[in-house]
Every structure is written in structure tokens, then in C-alpha cells.
Amino acid sequence: MQYTRPALTIAIPTVNRADLVCRAVESALAQTRADIEVIVSDNGSTDGTPGLLSRLRDRRLRHYRHERTMPASTHGKFLIDQAQGEFFVALSDDDYLEPEFSARVLELVERQAGLAFVYTKTIVHIDGVSVHTLAGPDVEPGADFLAAYFAWKREVRWCATASRLEHLRRIGEAPPEWVIGDMFYLVKLATLGDVGCVPLPLSNYTYLAGDNSSSRTPVARWAQELRILADEAMREYVDTGVDAAAISSFRRESDKFVARSTANQFLFNAIRGVEKGTLIRAFSDNWSLLGVDASSMARAAAAIALPSMALKWLILLAMRRRVASRRNSTQALPPAGS
């Protein structure tokens, strides 16, 4: 039988998420496009995950089991090395896709050659509150995407992103100490071609589910990585020949982006139980960074002053306000091919 390369690989890394991983796998196998493959890689689970995965049967599914847990960046490279699709989706074990995800993404890829990656809207779920992310145009130059992304006019979740596999392999493995892996790849991918968007809610991202290790990342490390990526994105933007006013705007907006994301990391550190003394030192060390945005300064201060339950309430309140502000822009899912 002649081999036919799949158009899309959906790769699901997992470790000790027996209560969630089957939902992710089932959502991948429920895709309406047949020309996909699904890879599940168990990174050393010690719970019931191996038994659950061993019972899954589908011709599109490949399952790997690692006896020892490897670093996330190494595990990610393993999945990329095993993939056979033209495009690659990394689906976390606590996230899941809508059935039309692959069809819609591949329709755009087939219409528009040369896209570095395609993303869809995502439904972000936090403790019973759900909000749709922001989307961009069908196609835009990578540098324009980066400018909009760091101005907080695009919201991209890695579970809703289909990246050209050859580009991922060209970029290579993220540094082993790197924490914000999704943004690391998004910035580098956007330097390699145009960016596509399907402005429909086709992926689901579960926030603060279980024990999210990134929420424990020290504030200083988080801020450092954000600044590196923002500077790299600005260099790419400058190279397009934009004028001084556009460069100044990018710098101003990226400074605010770094401040806001760092302030959010204060909140997540505090909710996860990082000691107040550690947060106070981080606040002092990042005073100038936070100072470019008054709301970021207030958010970081609240993380130090308030108990975790109050911080969770504030996050949910902000989410509900975001839901209300975006309610009118929510789009229904039309039939495929329309």
C-alpha cells in the first residue's frame, strides 16, 4: 500500500494526568478530517495513565511510553521528531480540540501557501468561567503579527496552533532551562513566514487545572524570558523597514506586555503558595519593569498583600468582565467549507 503523508500531526505529551488525558486524545481522534495522525507520549507516568492509554485503539494513533520523565523541552523535541504531518499541533493533556479544528486549519493552509503557522480562537476555561481569545486576520505578515501580539491584540494558545513541521525542526529544541516554550516558538516561527488565523473557537484551554508548573516559575525568570522574546520580536519588526514612530509604538506596547504578564506571574506565584518574602524581593527587583503600567504595579502589589482566595476571586472577576466585553464578538461555528 502506498504511504500517504498525514496533513496534520496532533501530539499529546502527558504525565500523571489519567483523569484528563483521555479527553484530549478523544478530541484529537474526533477530528472531521481523516488525513491526520495522533501521537500520545507518556513521559514516565506513575498513575493509571499507562493502562488507560494501552486500551486506546485507532489506526491514526501511535502511543509511546517512557519509563523516566525527561525535561519538557526534550520531550517536545521527541514528539517533533516522531511527527510525520506537514503541520504539527502540540495539545496539552488538560486541553482539547473541537471536531472542526483540523478541517478549518487545513482549509486555510490549502488556500494560502507558505504559512509558518495557523492559530484559531481558543475558549479559555477558569473555574467555570469561559472566555474566547482575540483573533487576527486570515493572513498577515509575521512581523505585523508580532507587533499586534505584543500590543495584546492577538491571543494565541499553543494548543490552538498548527505549526509547519519543517520550521519547528529548523528552530530546534528550546533551551532546557527555558520556561515559556510556546512563546519561544511563536516568536521564532513568525520570523519564518506569514501567520494564518481561523477566527473561530476551535480549541479549549484549561487554565490553572491541576498543578501547572509554569505558575511556579519565579517572577524574575519569567520577566527575563519575556524581555528576551520581546526584544527579538522588535528586531524582526525593525528589519521590515518601518518608521521611527512604529518602532517607538512597538517598544511602548511590548514594555506594557512584559509588565502585565509579569504582574500575572506574581498572582500565580502567590496562589501557588510562593512565600510573601520572595514576592516582596521580586517586586523590589522588578520595580522599574512594572512601573511602565500602573495596573501591573497594582496587580503585583495585590499578589503580595492579599490571601490566595481573594486573588482567585479577582482573577475570576476579571475573566467575567472580559466575557461581558467580548460577548457581542463571539462567532457561531458555520458549516465546514462555507
Image (tube, rainbow, N blue to C red):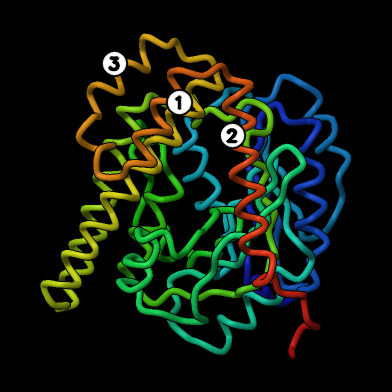
Q: Is residue 32 left or right of residue 310?
A: right
Disc 3 or disc 2, which is closer to the eye?
2
Residue 51 found in image quarter: top right
Disc 3 to disc 2: CB gap under 8 Å: no
Q: Is residue 279 above or below residue 336?
A: above
Residue 163 is labelled as none
Q: Is residue 249 left or right of residue 125?
A: left
Q: Position of residue 210 (x, y in %)?
A: 68, 28
Which of these two is toward me, 43 or 139? 139
* Residue at mark 3: 281
Whether residue 170 is visible, yes or no, is no
Mark-to-mark CA distance, 3 and 2: 23 Å
Whether residue 319 is visible, yes or no, is yes
Crowding at dot 1, Cα within 10 Å, few <14 / some 14-19 / many 20+, comes out as some
* Residue at mark 1: 302
Q: Position of residue 286 (x, y in %)?
A: 25, 29
Disc 1 to disc 2: CB gap under 8 Å: yes
Mark-to-mark CA distance, 1 and 2: 10 Å
Q: Residue at x 27, y 36 (%)?
A: 224
Mark-to-mark CA distance, 3 and 1: 14 Å
Q: Residue at x 49, y 31 (%)?
A: 214
Residue 116 found in image quarter: bottom left
Element on which disc 2 rests: helix
Q: Position of residue 50 (x, y in %)?
A: 78, 30
Crowding at dot 2, Cα within 10 Å, few <14 / some 14-19 / many 20+, comes out as some
Q: Amino acid at mark 3?
A: Arg
Element on which disc 1 rests: helix
* Mark with earlier residue (3, 1): 3
Residue 314 is labelled as 2
